[in-house]
Amino acid sequence: MQPSEQKNLVSVVVPCYNQGIYLRETVLSVLESTYRPLEVIIVNDGSKDDSLQLARALAEEFPEVRVIDQDNGGVSKARNTGIEASNGSIILPLDGDDLISSDYIAAAVEVLKSQPSVKVVYSKGVKFDDSGEKSWNLKPFSRHQLALDNMIFCSALFRKVDWLKAGKYSVEMRYMGREDWEFWIKMLKDGGEVVQLPFIGFYYRLTPNSKRKKTSSAAIKRERIAFMNSKHAAFFARELNGPLRFRRSWSKPYNTMLKWLGLF
């Protein structure tokens, strides 16, 4: 049975895999939000550290926090699990080591409530580690640029109904990486506006074991591009005049040249 949806409730879904050392800081950044009502759903994705124990301690301490424990299935599965169990009409995914500002949720919800045509709201962001903050220049959103690369970090706010219409996060991408990029394509390829808030609301933690580094080999990139072309061929044809290529920035000129030569 699906939980009943509460119109003004924001559900913050926190997948956690071996991020126990950061988990409390992440959850506190949510609970310090100026927005209410909200709930925090921590999805322990088969962690081998003390993440589950720490998550349960947070749930004991704070009534807004719930914990779901599942076998390791990857971040897409963990996000889907948390959203499926959520009670809110608005979703914010937040990885177990990242942070948000106290005013981020309130400002994003105001946009979603006042502008029905907007599907996704995010903010400016910074990257950080123990040495301090590092600037992060996100490109402006357009569907053409989204076909080439992602400019919306994973922790944007969206309506639960749009997640469902998009077909949820793709669990098939577990070992390919860039699941958030493919999800935004699913969410936005057929329309919907995107708003970036004019302040820093998201803090992306740089860690030595980031998944992005593990999924950057040429073989994995080729697998990822093949998957995305198989799922979104019409979108890439519209925006890039053909499929996404390994050298992504060359996609549209290369496809256009092949068509001009009658080879594609």
Image (cartoon, rainbow, N blue to C red):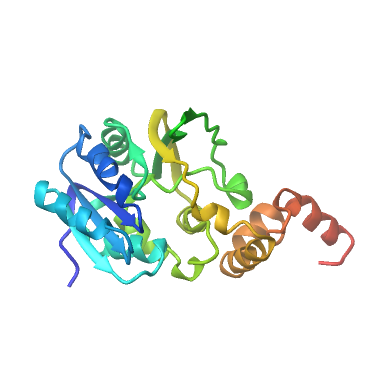
Tell which residue pokes out farthest to the right in this image. Answer: 261
Q: Left or right of 10: which side holds 123?
A: right
Residue that appears at 69% across and 54% down: 240
Q: Left or right of 243: which side holds 199?
A: left
Q: Position of residue 234 (x, y in %)?
A: 61, 63
How many marks do you count on the picture?
Answer: 0
Q: Position of residue 253 (x, y in %)?
A: 79, 50
- Which image quarter is the N terminus in? bottom left
Q: Left or right of 197: which side holds 23?
A: left
State whether residue 86 is above or below residue 127.
Answer: below
> Could you say which quadrant of the image residue 157 lies in?
top left
Tell which residue pokes out farthest to the top in this image. Answer: 199
State whether residue 64 is above or below residue 201.
Answer: below
Q: Position of residue 210 (x, y in %)?
A: 49, 51
Residue that appears at 54% across and 53% down: 212
Q: Position of residue 104 (x, y in %)?
A: 31, 34
> Could you say which quadrant of the image residue 118 lies in?
top left
Q: Which of 71/33 is in front? A: 71
Q: Is residue 110 visible?
A: yes
Residue that appears at 86% across and 67% down: 263
Q: Is residue 87 visible?
A: no
- Which image quarter is the C terminus in? bottom right
